[in-house]
Image (cartoon, grey):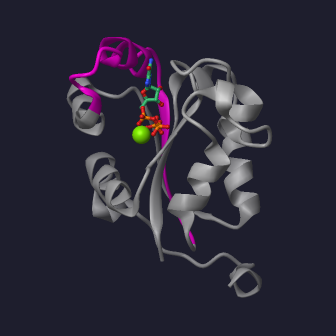
Amino acid sequence: MERTFLMVKPDGVQRGLIGEVITRFERRGFKMVASRFERLPDARVMEHYAEHVQKPFFPGLKAYITSGPCFMMVWEGKDIVKISRDMIGATNPAGAAPGTIRGDFALEIGMNVIHGSDSVETANREIAIHFKPEELVSYTRIDEQYLY
Ligand code: RTP
Ligand code: MG
């Protein structure tokens, strides 16, 4: 089954949106298989945002993402990478559709509440950066027979 890496960013944590985010993914039928609440160490920020390290917005992004704890998660389900990106909405909340997480809760590109992996390949890379294989649990949700 496909997996993705999701992270409630420091603004989302400070605004009390962890539960809201989890509820949306649970209701859709997705299954959380790992989580951790932590302030990201610099080295892991560089690894996670390797594609953005040279960009002009990176210093601001790094300061923001290390400004407080993040809620890190691995979720599992059919087509979860594409569907979770759709549920999260556009990177710039100004263009995020109502009904998406960013479209409902954010106003600024620099404080957009949540991160989600943008491809299956990226998801596998990000899961490996933030979690050890043994931290991912395997279980069956009781409603899976009606979801699949
Ligand atoms: P994310 O990685 O956080 O899920 O967001 P994303 O794929 O929608 O956007 P991405 O292009 O990967 O950018 C990563 C994060 O960097 C910040 N950003 N700021 N000021 C800017 O122009 C700018 N561009 C990107 C955002 O916080 C974005 O989520
Ligand atoms: Mg991204």
Q: Residue furthest front?
A: 95
Task: Tell me if 33 is positioned left or right of 17 in this view.
Answer: left
Residue at 29% across / 38% down in the picture? 48
Front position in the image: 18 or 124: 124
Task: Tell me if 24 is positioned left or right of 47 in this view.
Answer: right
- From the top left corner, tell me how far across and down residue 33 is, in percent: 50, 62
- State the extent of the magenta-drawn residues as a range: 52-77
- From the top left corner, tell me how far across and down residue 133 is, in percent: 30, 63
When the figure is inspected, residue 97 is found, relative to residue 141, above or below; the finding is: above
Say whether residue 32 is visible: no
When the figure is inspected, residue 83 is found, relative to residue 2, above or below; the finding is: above
- From the top left corner, tell me how far across and down residue 52 is, in percent: 28, 29
Query: Which quadrant would residue 49 be assigned to in this image?
Result: top left
Residue at 74% across / 39% down in the picture? 97
Residue at 59% across / 29% down in the picture? 113
Residue at 57% across / 74% down in the picture? 78
When the figure is inspected, residue 12 is found, relative to residue 115, above or below; the finding is: above
Say whether residue 147 is visible: yes
Front position in the image: 131 or 101: 101
Report the quarter where the C terminus lies.
bottom right
